[in-house]
Image (cartoon, rainbow, N blue to C red):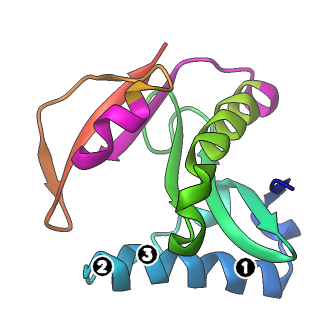
Amino acid sequence: MGLQWKIKAFEALSVHELYDLLRLRSEIFVVEQNCVYLDLDGKDKVALHLIGEFEGKTVAHARLFKPGISFDNASIGRVVVDANYRSKKWGHDLMREAIAAVAAHYNETAITIGAQLYLKKFYESHGFVQTSEMYLEDDIPHIEMTKE
């Protein structure tokens, strides 16, 4: 059995859904990556939230943005899969769903992301190409990548 997907605007998220996705992001981006940063950047309110659930638990999440929010192109951000489920390779399912959702909800195929450098090959496998030099974001090496 795979993931069950849902896409919701911020206002449509239940308090439990919001808590679960923020907890997941905190577990990975703050605790696992040992990075003190402010995850609540104000963009959740204007994002569509792609949520992957397995057996009723939020195990995958990504934010989807129309053009002009994070980049000139549409964008995908805060791509995260629960560490306990990474062996299932659901990150690839998450990216396929996110790319399809950007096309369906925003009628956009050009997507730009700010990717952690160590995930470059992962994003390349989904058609993204590096479009910037490496830069530090919260002391973690990142690159911009675009899929046309």
Q: Nearer the viewer, residue 114 or 126?
A: 126
Q: Can residue 131 be seen?
A: yes
Magenta-drawn segment? 104-123
Q: Any mark on residue 18, and which?
A: 1
Q: Are marks 3 and 2 in contact (CB under 8 Å)?
A: no
Q: Can you give x and y, in whole percent of width and height, for residue 138 in the image?
A: 20, 68
Q: Which mark is residue 47?
A: none
Q: Earlier in the sequence, mark 1 or mark 3?
A: 1
Residue occupying the point 51% across, 35% down: 68
- Residue designated by label 3: 28
6 lies above or below 11: above
Upstream in sequence: badge 3 or badge 2: 3
Cα distance in 3D space between marks 1 and 2: 19 Å
Q: Nearer the viewer, residue 28 or 62?
A: 28
Residue under pointer 2: 37
Quadrant, the N terminus = bottom right
Q: Is residue 7 visible?
A: no
**Are the residues tagged 1 and 2 within 8 Å (C-beta)?**
no
Horizontal and vertical percent position of residue 142: 22, 48
Label 2 secondary element? loop
Amino acid found under the numbered disc labelled 3: Ile
